[in-house]
Image (cartoon, helix red, strand yellow):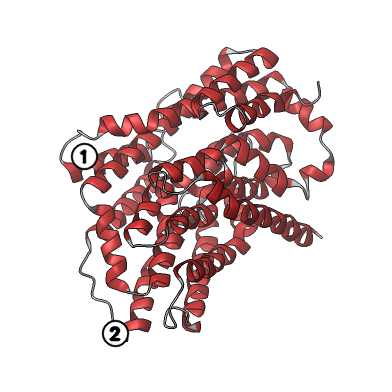
Amino acid sequence: MHFIALIPFCILFASFVFFRIALVHSAFIALLACVAVAGASVEALQNTLIFLFEIGFIVLGAFFFIEVAEQKGVIQSLADLVKEVSQNRVVQALLVGFPLCLIVEGSSGFGTPLLIIAPILRALGLPILLCALLPLINMIDGIPYGALGTPIRLGFGGISENITTISEMTVRSLYPFFFLTPALSFFLIRRKIKATKTESSPIWILWTLLLSTVYSICTLKVSKQSVEFPVLAGALVTFVIGIFSAHLIEKKKILKIKHRKGLFIYTLLLTTLWLGKQYWMDEKFPGTPIRIFNPGWVFLIFGIAISKSGDLLKPALNRSRRTLAVLFCITFTVQQLKLSGAMKTLLMNLPQSLLDDGIPFLGWLSSAMIGTGTIANLFISPLVIPENHGAVAAATALGVPLAFQSIIGVKSILKDQVSEKEILKYFLPISVTFMTFSMIFRHFTHS
C-alpha cells in the first residue's frame, strides 16, 4: 500500500474522535497498528528512548514548576501585576493572552499555556469561553519554540545541521500571525466582555499593533542567532513594554510595580535557561547523543527552591505521565515508519503540489491529528526538501491548538465549565481560516 504510513494515525484519530477512547489508550492502539503494518525494531525503540530521555525531563520539570507556581502564589502574583497595570479588561486580557502566553509556551511548551493562562484569565473575571480561546489562538506564535525550541531542535535535528536557518525561516513563515492573532484576540475580547466606551477607544487598537510590532521585530532578530530564544526574548520584551505603556496611556504616569514576585521569578528563570543554553547546550554525555544540559533540571531546581521541598513532584508526575505515555507511543510509531521505508513510499506517491504550496494544509492536518509540533515535524520533514522545513514548523504550529488533547486539556483545567462543542464552534473556523491564509501567503511569497 502506498499510504501505509497514514494507517496508524487514521486509527488514532478514529479511536479518539469517533469511539471516544482515552487519548493514551488511542495512542497505544496506534502503536499496535504501526507494529502490525510496519513491524518493530530495536533501533526505533532506541531512538524513541533517547528522544524521551531529553524531553521527559522537560515535561516533568515544567509540570512540577507549574504545580509550585500555582501553590506558592507565583501565578496569582502575575494576575495581581496585570490588575495593577490597568483596570481595562481588554488590556488585561491581551497582556495575559498574548505576550504572557508566549512566555509560558517558550519556557515550558507542551500545552502549558492552557494550564497556566486559562486560570489567570478566569481569575481576572473574563467570560469562560475567552479563557479557553485566547491561549489556543495565541500559542500558535510560539509552538515551534516551545520548551526552548524543542519542536525544531528534535523535529529537524537529524535532518539538517543548520537548525538556526530553520529557526529564521519558521519566524518568516509565521510573521503574519504575529499580527493576526493579537488583532483577532482584541476584537473577540471586546465582543465577549461587552466593552465600555473607554475599553473600545481606538488607542487600544494602536497599542495592540505596538505589541505585535515589538514582538515581530524581536523574534525575527533573535531567530537569526538562536533557535532557543526567539519567542522567549520577543514575548518578555513585549510583556514589559506592554505593561509600562498601557499604564502610561491609562494613568498618565510611570508604573511603579508592587506585585513583583511572579515577574522576578520568571525573569530569573528565563535568564538561567538562557545561560545554560548559551554555555552548555552542545555538551553531551561521552559516547552518547544525549545533551548534559536539560531545561527540565532548571524547572526542577526552581520549583524546589520556591517550595523548599519536593512534595509536589508526585502530583507533577501524575499530571505528566499520560503526556509521556502518548509521546512514547507516537514517537515510536513515527520512528518505526521512517525506518521501515513507509515514509519514503508515502513521499514517492504524494502529489508534488501537496509538498510545496500544500505544506500549510499538510502540517495543519498532521499536527491536529498527532497533537504535538515536534512529532508532526518528525513525520513530515522527510517528505519535503530542507528549504521547506521552516514552512513545515510554521504549518504544524497551526494545527496543535486544534488537536483534541489541547481542547480537552483547556476544558479540564477550566473544570468543564466550557464544552468541546463550544470551543470547536469558534476555533474550528478560526483554525481553518488561518490555514487557508497560510496557504495563500505561501503561494504569493513563492511566486
Q: Which residue sits at x=36%, y=68%?
A: 240
Tell me the residue that label 1 is attached to.
Answer: 304
Residue 246 rendering spot, x and y as whole percentages = 38, 77
**Most foreground residue, 443 or 249:** 249
Give residue 160's quadrant in the image: top right
Query: Height in image: 31 above or below 130?
Result: above
Q: Which quarter of the figure is the C terminus placed in?
A: bottom right
| Distance from the alpha carbon under mark 2 to that under mark 1 | 38 Å
N-term-proximal mark, 2 vs 1: 2
Tag 2, which secondary structure?
loop
Asked whether residue 249 appears in the rendered view, the answer is yes
Instruction: Tell me the mark number nearer the camera, choosing from 2 and 1.
Output: 2
Q: Which residue sits at x=30%, y=61%?
A: 79
Q: Please, what is the three-letter code of the amino acid marked with disc 1? A: Ile
Other-residue count near label 1 (Cα within 10 Å), few / some / many at <14 / 14–19 / ≥20: some
Q: Please, what is the three-letter code of the amino acid marked with disc 2? A: Lys
Residue 356 rendering spot, x and y as whole percentages = 78, 47
Tell me the residue that label 2 is attached to.
Answer: 253
Q: Which residue sits at x=35%, y=49%?
A: 275
